[in-house]
Image (cartoon, rainbow, N blue to C red):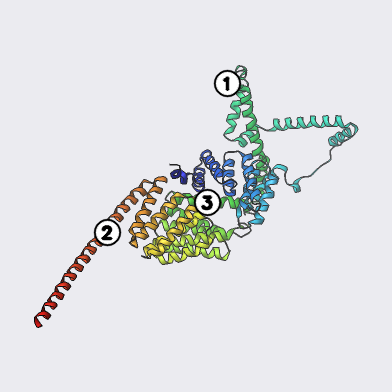
Amino acid sequence: MADDDLPVVSFGSLMTEGTTLSRRGQHDKALGCFNDALKLRAGDKHCLITRSRCFLKLGDTENSLKDAEASLEIDNTFYEGLYQKAEALYAMGDFEFALVFYHRGRRLRPDLHKFQLGINKAEEAIINCIGNPSSVKLETKEELCFVSRQAELQSKSNKQKQQNKPKDQKDQKQTKKQSPKTEQQLLGQLYADKAYLEKLLKDEDLMQSSTRQGVKVVDLVLGGISYLKQRRDFWQQQKPMYARLYERKVLRQGRARDKRQKPSDIARAIAKEVEDIELMLARGSAEESCRKAERLLKKIQAWSEDEVPNKNELIGNLHSRIGDAQLAMGQMEAALRSHKMDLDCARQNTLTDAVSRALDNIGHVYARTGKFQQAINTWEEKIPLAQSSLEKAWLFHEIGRCYLELDKAEVAQDYGQKSLQSAEEEGDVEWQLHATVLVAQAQVKLKDYRSAILNFERALEKARLVPSESAQNGIIAALDNVSKSFIAELNKGHEDGMISSREDRLFSSESIKTTTDNVEEEEKEN
């Protein structure tokens, strides 16, 4: 029983399940999957990074940073580790250190626009905290000179005490200056929670009580208020109110002079629109997704590379999105043209990942239109670009499926076995199921019914592990058909054997009769 359950808890299946749960927003459950995966393969840098992202989503910045640093200890040139460390530092408010790692990542992978976005937002956060150096002017006033003279006359111990006192007064002054309106804008919906907690503090009877676990209510309330103040200060650092007012003022003054957006703002707007395009297609609104992608493509083509540093990459990506939408609408020729434009753009700009994506999509269009040989040629060109065993598993499977459609069962069987080997390396049970079924179907075409039955039985076991009821029903039906064919072949072979033996007996009796007749004739002549 333990052996049967082993594929279910393989590293690959845990990673797949954790990633799926994380995309659904179930980060607590996803975290459990990543923890189990690291028990099976300790120190896997890709798993550490996915778990780091999960921690960050849950607000656990310290553990997120630890996982990112652990991945860099394994490989200090791992660009995903650098990016995740920068993201964790940014979330912790360490904008200067975050900026350092965004720059390191961009030096390694200048083709990835997310590092430039990180640099932009970190620099903006730093300026919001300390202000723009060019705009700071120091003035010597009489009061400051007096304080300076007094400080020089005091001893070191008195000087320290006097410095602490004005600092506290300054903090109190800043706290008093922060109006409820400003605080409400910073906290948003949480402002009502803070006001409620402050109101509870005035209830002396409640503050003196304790919970069933023995925790004082006043400690809980003060802890909540302290947390909200910390969040307020953090958001104030990232985007303080004075910076927002200043931006509005500058925008009003400079609108006539310069209507161009910042590259970081443009990048955010583009990312949001691309996300909307993908979401529309996922929801079945292919036509609307296609129109929105075409409008965005025209906008990006009109912008300069200074405004959009990764302009060519985005153009190719949008051609791909348009092709996906056209394929969903059944516009095969248009989809093929769009994906070929994506491929041309990727090759001109030496974007390896984009080339792999375009070849994948072109192969799918060819396969959907029944042009299986063209699909095979396209996908075989993609094989050297496959980056993981899982990607090879489905790629070999699709090529084998095309060969099966062309009645080239032997080649289909070979690709099915390659797909199965890659799926086993990755530990993915679902693709092991698909590959095993492909091998069995090829063996049916080759009339190797005995091997086909064995592989269908293996596939049925994997379908129960996935689990997939529809796959189980399909495999059972296929097993029934193959078994009937196998029995029919055995019966035919048995009948052919009986006929052959009957003919041999007849031939032998006729030979004996002929020989006997010849002997009798010879005796009569004598």
Q: Closest to the observer: 58 or 441?
A: 441
Residue 47 in percent (x, y) is at: 57, 47
Is 207 situated above or below 513? above
Disc number placed over residue 273 in the picture, else none: 3
The amino acid on which the numbered mark 1 sits, given as a three-letter code, is: Thr
Q: Which residue is mark 1?
A: 211
35 vs 481: above or below? above
- Give the camera-side residue of 487 and 20: 487
Which image quarter is the C terminus in? bottom left
Q: Amino acid at mark 2?
A: Leu
- Between the residue at mark 3 and the residue at mark 2, the CA separation in whole angstroms equals 63 Å
Q: Amino acid at mark 3?
A: Glu
Q: Which of the two discs, 2 and 1, labels the residue nearer the N terminus? A: 1
- Of mark 3 and mark 2, the one earlier in the sequence is 3
**Left or right of 328 on screen, residue 496:** left
Question: Is residue 331 at all visible to an observer of this figure?
Answer: no
Q: Residues within 10 Å of mark 1 (few under 14, many from 20)?
A: few
Q: Is residue 515 left or right of residue 193?
A: left
**Mark 2 → mark 1, Cα distance in angstroms:** 79 Å
Image spot of residue 161 (x, y percent): 82, 29
On the question of residue 296 being in view, the answer is yes
* Label 2: element kind: helix
Choose between 208 and 69: the one closer to the eye.
Answer: 69
Q: What is the secondary structure assignment of the residue under circle 1?
A: loop
Closer to the chain start, of discs 1 and 3, is: 1
Which residue matches tag 2?
Answer: 490
Is label 3 in a helix, a strand or a loop?
A: helix
